[in-house]
Amino acid sequence: MKFGVVVFPGSNCDQDMIYVLSNIMEQEVVKLWHKDTDLQNVDAVVLPGGFSYGDYLRSGAIARYSPIMEKVIEFANNGGFVFGVCNGFQILCETGLLPGALLHNDNQKFICKNIHIIPDNNTSSITGLLDKQFALKIPIAHGEGRYFAKKEVLQDMRQNGQILFRYCDEHGEITSQANPNGSVENIAGVCNAKKNVFGMMPHPERGADDELGNTDGRLIFESILAFIQK
């Protein structure tokens, strides 16, 4: 598999993502600079976390207009696999490739800590190999991570299996206390109706290396590879 990791001014998790994909998952990886207009024949595109363009206006609002995004949107519309983490998730929502929006955390503070999420379904490449009864410990680091979508949009998403993850406690219980940012219905990750574009606020690349003492995030990458390589 050949992955392309998009790098914007302000990206700060691009090297983390490249390290996990290349060193841990043993995949080919290339950097895609935000001014590029060539995806270099990649099989999958990843938009990493960070603060693209300093998060001016809204998070992801400026990055959405970078030259590379025209090609990413075209790639996605043609069925290509696209995965956005944190700021990458925000950018995908800004493009309209994913439904909903990411708003300021309800406590108006930046949150950086380990949380737990649980898969909502097993019908996507990201969640296909995951145990729906097992809570994954994954770090978060964001100030605008509160997911929001209108009621009618949420209804369609539930029916289509577009909700990937929900915030929960360590036992897998979905509670308001386990919701770190006030996201509607504890939603931590979603996909599009065609299930080829994915976004999540937690950082699986920060929980994929044995040296970090947490490898729950690696399970997500293993699921991705298992399904993309079919």
Image (spheres, grey):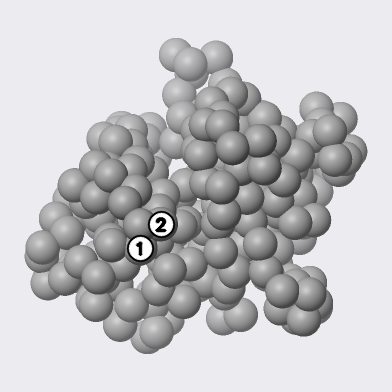
Rendered-image quadrant of the N terminus: bottom left
Up/down of 37 relative to 14, above or below: below
Q: Is residue 112 above or below residue 192?
A: above
Counting from the top left corner in percent of width and height, residue 156 is at 75, 81
Q: Is residue 86 visible?
A: yes
- Residue at horizontal 28 percent and vertical 44 percent from the top: 54
Picture coordinates of residue 118, whole percent (x, y): 75, 44
Mark 1 burial class by Cα count in 10 Å: few <14, some 14-19, many 20+: some
Q: Is residue 224 above or below residue 206?
A: below
The location of residue 90, given as percent across then percent down, is 46, 57
Q: Which mark, residue 202?
A: none
Disc 2 residue crowd, few under 14, some 14–19, many 20+, Cα 10 Å: some
Amino acid at dot 1: Ala
Camera-side residue of 223 and 185: 185
Kindly indicate whether the residue at mark 2 contacts the one at mark 1 (C-beta within 8 angstroms).
Answer: yes
Judged left or right of residue 213, residue 67 is left
Quadrant in which residue 172 is drawn: top right
Task: Tell me: 97 left or right of 124.
Answer: left
Circle 2 sits on which residue?
A: 58
- Report whether 179 appears left or right of 6: right
Q: Which residue shows up at 47% across the image and 47% down it?
A: 86
How far from the left and from the top, in percent, is residue 153? 71, 78
Residue that numbered label 1 is attached to: 61
Marks 1 and 2, how far apart at CA: 5 Å
The residue located at (72%, 74%) in the rendering is 150
Question: At 28% from the left edge and 62% from the top edge, which residue is drawn?
Answer: 62
Which element type, helix, strand or loop, lies under badge 2? loop
Label 1 residue SS: loop
Asked whether residue 21 appears in the rendered view, the answer is no
Q: Amino acid at mark 2?
A: Arg
Above or below: residue 32 compared with residue 43: above
Q: Quadrant of residue 47?
A: bottom left
